[in-house]
Amino acid sequence: MNRIMVLFYDPNFGIAIEDALEESGVSYLMVKTPETLFEVDPLFCKTMIEAETNIETLKGLRDDRQLNIAGTFAKINDRYESIILEAV
């Protein structure tokens, strides 16, 4: 499993993502969005979800539940790398 950062624009979208992860048995944490990611998109919420999952599971949840995910990232060597869900 990987730790994937899931970002959203509206706190209500975050609640829907949390619910989907919880119902699927995926471990996650709500954490403060790192300042670095606001350089990517200043409209990200101030909190994000850090999920212990793989990209296929996250993509499946997004598609099945029609989740509004603004961005997904993995932290690699102290850098955040964007993960494109459509490419999976």
Image (cartoon, helix red, strand yellow):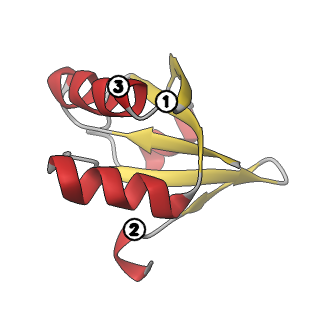
Q: Residue at x 19, y 31 (%)?
A: 13
Secondary structure beneath dot 2 equals helix
Could you tell which of marks 3 and 2 lies nearer the N-terminus?
3
Amino acid residing under circle 3: Glu
Mark 2 Cα shell of 10 Å, populated few (<14), some (14-19), many (≥20): some
Q: Which residue is mark 1?
A: 25
In the rendered image, the vertical position of residue 69 relative to residue 31, given as above or below: below
What residue is shown at x 63% (from left), y 53% (from top)?
A: 74
Identify the secondary structure beneath mark 1. Answer: loop
Q: Secondary structure at mark 3?
A: helix
Residue 50 figure quarter = top right
Residue 15 position (above or below residue 72):
above
Q: Is residue 32 left or right of residue 1?
A: left
Q: Position of residue 23 (x, y in %)?
A: 36, 27
- From the image, which quarter does the C terminus lie in? bottom left
Camera-side residue of 17 and 84: 17
- The residue singled out by tag 2 in the image is 85
Mark found first going from the N terminus, 1 or 3? 3
Disc 2, disc 1: CB below 8 Å? no
Residue 15 in the image: state x and y as whole percent.
Answer: 25, 21
Tell me where residue 21 appears, x and y as whole percent.
40, 32
Judge left or right: residue 76 versus residue 3.
Answer: right
Q: Are marks 1 and 3 in contact (CB under 8 Å)?
A: no
Q: Give residue 18's mark.
A: 3
Which sits in the foreground, 23 or 84? 23
For the point 22% across and 36% down, the residue is 9
Task: Choose mark 2 or mark 1, whichever is in front.
Answer: 1
Question: What is the three-letter code of the residue carrying label 1?
Answer: Gly
Q: Residue furthest bottom?
A: 87
